[in-house]
Amino acid sequence: MEKTNNTWTTRMLTEGAICIALSFVLGRIKLFEMPQGGSITAGQMIPLIIFALRHGCVKGLLVGAVYGVLDMIFGGYIMHPVQAILDYPLAFGLLGLAGIFSDKFLETKNIGPILVGTAIAVLGRFICHVLTGVIFFASYAPEGQGALMYSIIYNGSFLLVEFAITLVIIYLLRNFLTRDMTKINKI
């Protein structure tokens, strides 16, 4: 697997489409839904993060952004074009940041890069949602509470749980993820 190569193979395109479809299905299984948007799902971010780990940051960013557009089209809440971009293609595209450590992960077979990459990716998504909360949803903040603090608490409440679910499932999948990917890619 070449991480710096910008070409897409048929296999990568197919894998990206499967990861998008899996994320779409997992995102529709809502364990808890927040009143003004956002939800705890059955692991919506996991396939996108796995794709980024396997194929690198740039390809992961693109697959995540495509997923974000689809998520926006099929059930997104849009107040403003900038909010739509921040909450959907950019927020989910940033999950591709998990691929920053993909080379190190594949070389060492260590779970650490997966965990750090996942944390960075979810932090990127969190920042996007906090920004939209401050800019576009400040009116929902309780009286006496600043928009920034409200947005951090609101978005952190569901994304922290989503992050925990993602880490647990990725940890359980670690044996599969740390397999020799060159053998899997030859299949």
Image: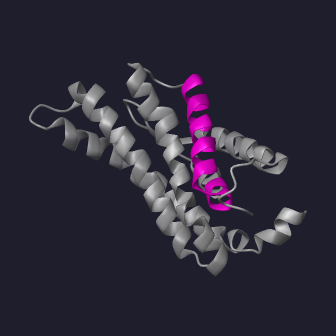
What is the chief secondary structure element of the magenta stretch? helix
The span picked out in magenta is 51-74
* Residue 118 screen position, x and y as percent: 50, 60
> Does the rendering let one see residue 43?
no
Relative vertical location of residue 20 with respect to residue 187 in this rendering, above or below: above
Estimate the x, y position of residue 166 in percent, counting from the top left: 54, 58
Magenta stretch holds residue 15: no
- Horizontally, is 170 left or right of 136 in the view? right
Report the quarter where the N terminus lies.
Answer: bottom right
Residue sitting at x 84%, y 46%: 10
Quadrant containing the C terminus is bottom right
Provide residue 168's location: percent of width, then percent of height. Answer: 55, 65
Q: Residue at 46% across / 23% down in the picture?
A: 77
Q: Nearer the viewer, residue 38 or 132?
A: 132
The residue located at (59%, 79%) in the rendering is: 110
Above or below, comparing residue 165 to residue 158 in the picture: below
